[in-house]
Image (cartoon, rainbow, N blue to C red):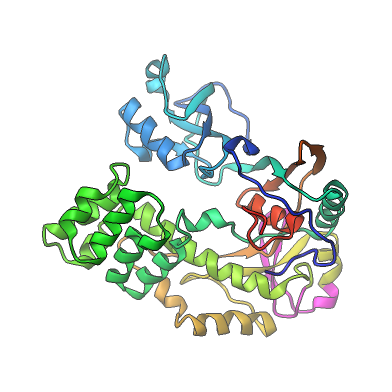
Amino acid sequence: MKFQTPDLPGTGGRYKEHPCDFQVEEIPLYPCSGTGEHLYLWVEKEGITTRELLRQLAQRLDLNERDIGYAGLKDARALTRQQLSVPANRAARLDGLRLRQAKILTTTRHGNKLRLGHLAGNRFSIRLQDTLPDGCRRAEAILQQLQMTGVPNRFGEQRYGSLGNSHLLGKFLLQKEYQSFCSEWLGDPQKISEPLWRRAAEAFRAGDLKLALELMPHRMRDEQHLLQELLRGKPIARAVLDLPRPLLRLFLSAYQSYLFNQLLEQRLPRLGHLECGDLAIKHSNGACFRVKDAMIEQPRADRFEISPSAPLFGYKVLLAEGLAGEREGQLLTAEQLTLADWKLGAGMAMPGERRPLRVPLGTARVAPADNGLQLEFSLPKGSYATSVLYEVIKSTSPADGT
């Protein structure tokens, strides 16, 4: 792995020993008005995904999951605080409501449903353990450098699911390789630690759909539904495409993320360096423009007004020109893709967009802690704390420090 701060030695260490070691708090995009048809819930959860939280609320409040608004998805292996919105007519049902591994801290009314992306960013408080003796000094130097040059805007490991294969699922969907999709989604037995799930995956790969269904853990409802449909004789393509659209789009977006990360790696450690033909993004409003003369525009990049971008590939995305455009075209060729391939039917078409290669690091602090360090910083929405941790720890496997 390449780094934005390759000349600064890392702290070493580990994180996520316990969920409370990795705390995330949303920064709301706007304050609630106090009146309106929607009730905003400030919720704290630990050890579950946002989607699991949505399922619980939908069941307890007798709602469809689509009736619940959220601004972003939060990692399961963390202590997180985020906003959700529900119809205000469910307010009475919240009295005495108990949630598994989550609790509602406050409620406030507002006029509109919370939408995906309706947040300014996230604040992080992260405990690193077993860092080097001079880790505090090293972390301070790295964070200072990142505040000047920006944080690599790569997608984090959680983007790819518990087995790290969500991007492969997206690729199989694009390629219409539905048998491969099913085998990969139900899991590679060698990568699964949970006994029942591992045995279910083994049964599926051996062709025993009935046993696979019997063994599949109860919480894995979508996987169970797929197996039920296959047992009923539904064609495999239809069974896959009948899975929830948000789930399938999540896999496609993971593949977009995987390809974006490859292009980002090619530009490190000079993510703020413009090239002629680049498509630059203005950090103030997200507007995108083509760089005709890199020397003229570079001072704006040095002031962090703009940054070069790379595509989240899709059927409508604009590609760069010059060297940047060559790299994007070569990646598509290597993956045997065209932009038109992303124009899938049945609500799965992915238009694509440009994403900046770097993002600003908000106010950052580091302090010594027992046998380690405590880091605090903020990032814009859509950015991953692991990008900062990669730089600080200087590890290719930051979860275990190896």
Q: Relative to 120, is 146 on the left or the right? A: right
Count of residue discs: 0
Q: Nearer the viewer, residue 14 or 314?
A: 14
Query: Residue 290 lies in magenta, yes or no?
Result: yes
Q: Is residue 233 above or below residue 117?
A: below
Q: Nearer the viewer, residue 193 or 209?
A: 193
What span is colored magenta in the figure?
Answer: 274-296
Where residue 104 appears, as percent x and y from the top left, is 50, 24
Where residue 181 appears, as percent x and y from the top left, is 33, 67
Where residue 355 appears, as percent x and y from the top left, is 62, 63
Where residue 272 appears, as percent x and y from the top left, is 78, 67
Picture quadrant of residue 308: bottom right
Asked if residue 345 can be seen in this view, the reply is no
Q: Is residue 229 above or below residue 61?
A: below
Asked if residue 174 can be seen in this view, the reply is yes
Picture quadrant of residue 302: bottom right
Q: In the rendered view of the protein, which quadrant contains the N terminus? A: bottom right
Q: Nearer the viewer, residue 251 or 10?
A: 10
> Residue drawn 43% across and 68% down?
168
> Residue drawn 51% across and 70% down?
313
Q: Nearer the viewer, residue 130 or 216?
A: 130
Q: In the rendered view of the protein, which quadrant contains the C terminus? A: bottom right
Q: Is residue 157 above or below residue 364?
A: below
Query: Residue 384 lies in magenta, yes or no?
Result: no
> Residue drawn 75% across and 80% down?
276
Q: Relative to 168, is 393 on the left or the right? A: right
> Residue drawn 14% across and 58% down?
231
Q: Is residue 280 above or below residue 111?
A: below
